[in-house]
Every structure is written in C-alpha cells, then in structure tokens.
Amino acid sequence: MPALRRSTCMSPLIQAIAAATAAGFASMIVAFFFTTRLSQTWLTRMVSFAAGLMLAIALLDLLPEALEGGMAANDLFTLLLVALLSLFVLESKLHGGCATSCTDDLARPVPMVLVGGALHIFTDGLVLGATFLVDPLLAWGIALAVLLHEIPREAGDFALLLSARWSHHKALLWNAVSRFGCVIGAILGYLTLANEPHWLPYVLAIAAANFIYLALSGILPWLRHGNGSFAWQGSMMIAGAALVPLSLEFLR
C-alpha cells in the first residue's frame, strides 16, 4: 500500500465524511429537481430507464467489481443466488404473499428501492473512505465521479417513488435518509475496510442482487401492464443500460 498522505488542512477522516456528504446529497438534489419537473408520462418512461440502469449497474459494474476484488466466481454466484432467494422470502413476508393482482402496483417494491439505493451508495462510501487513507486527492476525484454517476440512478429512484404516488416531500425525505449510507460507508471504509478489503466484494454482490431482483420482480411486471408504449419502454431501458458502460469508459 502506498504511503499515507496527510492533509495539512483537514484529517483524511473529516475529508472522507465531507466528500461522502457532497457526493451523496448533491446528486440527490440535482436528481430531485430534474424529476419533479417531469410529466406523469415521462415519469413512466423514467421508470423504464431505471430498470435498464439497475440491471446494467448490477451486471456490468457491481458483479465485475466483486470478481476483480478477488471473490471466486463460484462463491459470487452462490451468494447471488442466496441473496435473490432471501429477497423473495423477505418481500413475501413484508407484503403477505401478494396475489397476482398486486403485480400492477408499483408501490410493492418501493422500500427495496430505497434499501437498494442505500446499499449501492454505501459501497461507494466504503471505497471513498479507504481511498482517503491512501491519497486524498485521488479520493476527491472519486467523490466527483460518484456524484456524476449517482445523478441518473437517483433520477430513476425518484421516478419510481413518484410513480408509486409518493409525495415530493416524502420521496425527498426518504431518499435523504438513504443517502446517509454514503457517509456511514465512508466512515466504515476509513476505519475498517482498508485493513479488511476482502469484505467489499460480498457487499457488492448483495447490492447487485437487490438491483436485479428489483428490476425483474417489481419494475418489469408493472411496465408489462400497459404503462406506456412498448417502443418508449424499450428505448428508455436500452438508454439506461447503455449509460453504465459509457460512464465506466468515461471515468477510466
């Protein structure tokens, strides 16, 4: 590990907290003002965008990062399977075994949208905290990258919550609560993950499972029940999925 670099102005831990706060909450505010100006038609289209984005984040970003982090492929997919089955059991218990008629209700997966967002931004915070131990300047660059790539995902989350008939204030409040995941992740990353990096791939795999489950069990069934035209749904899903490899290439 490179020699630790200490800032003369603020300790790396304080910088990590400040960067995580900025990355998590600035992206939320930008996304909120963007989505609150959309019509109901465009909110539905943004839900399709969110589905493509979630699947691409899970399959093209989180799972490859878990493999690159040293997790064996067999362990990764075993954990993915266990996490998906656990999410099904958890959701069934929370919603009392929803009947088929519940598949057109987008409110069903809303709590898991917030949990998934918190898990995702939590992993970003872990990376931020660990990086501030090594190179604060590089970590601030990562914070900017987190802010930029969180904006479209946050916009998708707001579109889901507003389409599920949440008020603007309620959607903003609960998204703000989930944003604290970035700050908590940064603190834990700084204090523990730098010495225990083998845990990060497991967190990434669980976050990926949550996004896959949300997209396939909650959003796509809702979209199939006539919420918007097929052409718009398909186009927005492709746009959401394409954004991930493009942003990953840009940030390299």
Image (spheres, helix red, strand yellow):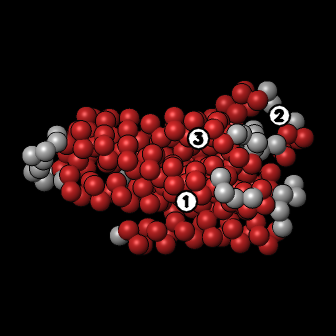
Mark 3 crowd level (few <14, some 14–19, many ≥20, 10 Å Cα): some
Determine which residue is flagged by label 2.
98
Q: Position of residue 20 (x, y in %)?
A: 36, 45
For the image shown, how many numbered marks are present on the structure? 3
Callout 2 environment at 10 Å: few (<14), some (14 to 19), or many (20+)?
few
Judge left or right: residue 47 versus residue 1. Answer: right
- Mark nearest the camera among 1 and 2 is 1
User: Which SS class for mark 1?
Assistant: helix
Name the residue carrying label 1. Answer: 152
Percent of width and height locating residue 241: 60, 66
Q: Secondary structure at mark 3?
A: helix
Q: CA distance from mark 3 to mark 1?
A: 15 Å
Q: Nearer the viewer, mark 3 or mark 1?
A: 3
Do we see residue 170 in this rendering? Answer: yes
Instruction: First in sequence, mark 1 or 2: give its number.
Output: 2
Using the image, tell me which numbered label, if any, was put on residue 172: 3
Q: Is residue 92 left or right of residue 1?
A: right
Relative vertical location of residue 140 with respect to residue 175 in this rendering, above or below: below
